[in-house]
Amino acid sequence: MYNFHGSCHCGNLKVDYKTTIAAKDAAVRACQCSFCRKHDARAISDPAGTIEITARDPALLERYRFGIGVIDFLICRKCGVYVSAYTRHDDKAFANVMVNVLDERATFPQPNPVNLDGENKADKRQRHKNNWTPAILRGD
Ligand SMILES: [Zn+2]
């Protein structure tokens, strides 16, 4: 297992990502939705790993939603950094992590663009279950 650490800029939101995939082998995704384009977001996930996200001050955790509203885009209200996309299906939580918040960000490959326009709720649920990482969000 590889263990990557990261946080938002002010340190309120901490990320602990355990994965079976080395940084150099990670499939980095540049989602082409309007939100991710504005953040220049680069996402990774590993269904065999775990992601733990901790909000030191839960009042500063923003769960931004848009579109069909099945995903919480976790943003720090203090420093504005987008750390993870998070969702729950059938009492299980799944998330990805933004490479840019990880201390080791420079060791990951360039992203490939991914266009998820046109996915419906069921498509998204299935993709999250298949591809995203089992997650724990502390400070809920
Ligand atoms: Zn912050």
Image (tube, grey):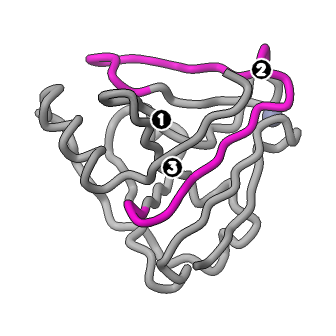
Amino acid type indicated by mark 1: Tyr
Alpha carbon of mark 2 to alpha carbon of mark 3: how far?
23 Å
Residue at 64% across, 47% down: 52
- Magenta segment: does it hold 61? yes
Please state the quadrant of the image where ligand 1 appears.
top right
Dot label at residue 58: 2
Find numbered disc 1 in the image and state the secondary structure of the residue it sits on: strand
Tell which of 14 and 138 is nearer to you.
Answer: 138
Residue beneath disc 1 = 86
> Which quadrant of the structure image shows residue 12?
top right
Residue beneath disc 3 = 41
Q: Quadrant of the N terminus?
A: bottom right
x and y, in percent, of residue 29 in the image: 38, 60
x and y, in percent, of residue 44 in the image: 46, 60
In this image, 69 relative to 74: left or right? left
**First along the sequence among labels 2 and 3:** 3
Magenta span covers which residues?
46-71
Q: Quadrant of the C terminus?
A: top right
Q: Nearer the viewer, mark 2 or mark 3?
A: 2
- The correct choice, above or below, for 129 with respect to 5 in the image is above
